[in-house]
């Protein structure tokens, strides 16, 4: 049996609109999701026992059954007991490079990598669609993380429509190391403030008056209109996260003062700015370091990518 080393990309939200609250506690969304080449490395090795083991080099990431990557392995073992009996357990090692609790789908992409990796390791021959279904049982962003690229995501985020790749962008990401935002808190606060009287099963975006610009964003992406893509970045969750975290608001404003389109990703607190070249991205990063000389602020440069999970190597 082979061991696999996989790279699992983070995502950013170019667009996130909350269409309505659902009775099941989730929300109907319209999102445009984009993979970036900031990635964790996930190593999968046969454990030689019946157990699943997990190790991660990041202190804030749980190393037990609550880790989403562990849950992915346990789900595959449960759904395919014959393969589990034949091949045995697995050692999962996560080299964390994606900041945690950052709105970049770090946990979801780790789970996606385990699903993709075990499909290969245990020779399950599951299709991408079947893997996406399994992913949807683990979390709303996991189906996207299986495929990656540029996608329109609706429902909870699990209904995916591929969009033309816009991989000509670079992105500068900024996150305060000591800050993390709970996704559940962000959505619950939004629901409480803006959606309380409007809980409905009905997913009909055309019925929502306050609907923003998803069509325009999709059009701009289809036409590769770089300037418009920057202008149409949108995230409803900024309405609850930015007032709570003024330093995140300031970071966004600094990006904008530098002439970049800046936006929070997902439930934050990561803020990103789009640039058209690596050199420009590096300049923006250096300028932000000067205007916000806070050692707690981590900054990265990454590139849009059209893939999410990649096999880096496999050995017998
Ligand atoms: P999303 O954008 O999907 O809402 P996020 O990027 O905001 O996610 P994560 O980095 O996935 O957040 O982490 C959220 C929480 O999930 C963390 O506080 C951590 O305790 C838990 N967690 C479980 N498994 C993992 C994992 N493999 N990697 C990172 N965090 C994990």
Image (cartoon, helix red, strand yellow):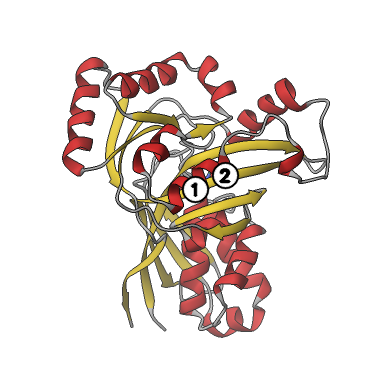
Residue found at x 64% / y 34%: 184
Tell whether 153 sits left or right of 56. right
Instruction: Count every numbered label the image shows and give the total.
Output: 2
Determine whether the residue tagged by mark 1 lies in a helix, strand or loop.
helix
Element type where label 2 sits in the image: helix
Residue 247 x %, y % = 41, 16
- Residue placed at 46% from the left, 29% from the top? 269
Q: Is residue 125 left or right of residue 191?
A: left
- How far across and how far down the image is residue 168, in percent? 29, 51
At x 18%, y 27%, the residue is: 286
Cα distance between the residues tagged 1 and 2: 6 Å
Q: Is residue 172 left or right of residue 55?
A: left
Q: Between residues 86 and 227, which one lies in front from this camera angle?
A: 227
* Residue 250 horizontal/vertical position (percent): 39, 16
Task: Give the quadrant of the C terminus.
Answer: bottom left
Side of 282 relative to 71 (left or right): left
Relative to residue 265, is residue 116 depicted above or below?
below
Q: Nearer the viewer, residue 251 or 126?
A: 251
Q: Relative to 206, does residue 134 appear above or below in the rendering?
A: below
Q: Which residue is denoted by mark 1 in the rendering?
A: 219
Residue sitting at 41 percent across and 40 percent down?
A: 229
Contact check, label 1 and label 2, Cβ < 8 Å: yes
**Residue marked by disc 2:** 215
For disc 2, the neighbor class at 10 Å (few under 14, some 14 to 19, many from 20) is few
Task: Name above or below for residue 182 compared with residue 58.
Answer: above
């Amino acid at each position: 049996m082979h061991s696999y080393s996989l790279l699992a990309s983070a995502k950013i939200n170019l667009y996130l609109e909350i269409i309505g609250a659902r009775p099941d506690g989730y929300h109907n969304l319209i999102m445009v999701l984009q993979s970036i080449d900031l990635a964790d490395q996930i190593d999968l090795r046969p454990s030689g026992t019946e157990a699943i083991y997990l190790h991660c080099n990041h202190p804030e990431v749980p190393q037990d059954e609550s880790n989403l990557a562990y849950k992915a392995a346990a789900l595959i073992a449960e759904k395919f007991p014959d393969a589990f009996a034949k091949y045995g357990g697995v050692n999962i090692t996560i080299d964390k490079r994606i900041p945690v609790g950052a709105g970049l789908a770090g946990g979801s992409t780790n789970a996606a990598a385990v699903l993709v990796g075990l499909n290969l390791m245990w020779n399950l021959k599951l299709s991408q669609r079947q893997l996406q279904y399994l992913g949807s049982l683990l979390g709303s962003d996991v189906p996207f993380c299986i495929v990656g690229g540029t996608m329109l995501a609706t429902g909870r985020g699990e209904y995916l429509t591929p969009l033309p790749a816009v991989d000509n962008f670079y992105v500068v990401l900024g996150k305060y190391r000591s800050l993390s935002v709970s996704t559940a808190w962000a959505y619950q606060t939004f629901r409480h403030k803006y959606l309380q009287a409007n809980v409905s099963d009905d997913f009909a975006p055309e019925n929502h008056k306050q609907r923003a610009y998803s069509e325009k964003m999709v059009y701009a992406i289809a036409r590769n209109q770089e300037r418009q893509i920057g202008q149409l970045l949108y995230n409803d969750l900024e309405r609850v996260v930015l007032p709570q975290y003024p330093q995140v608001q300031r970071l966004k404003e600094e990006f904008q003062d530098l002439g970049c389109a800046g936006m929070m990703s997902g439930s934050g607190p990561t803020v990103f700015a789009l640039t058209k070249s690596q050199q420009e991205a590096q300049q923006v990063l250096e300028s932000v370091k000067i205007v916000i000389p806070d050692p707690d602020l981590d900054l990265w440069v990454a590139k849009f990518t059209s893939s999410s999970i990649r096999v880096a190597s496999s050995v017998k």
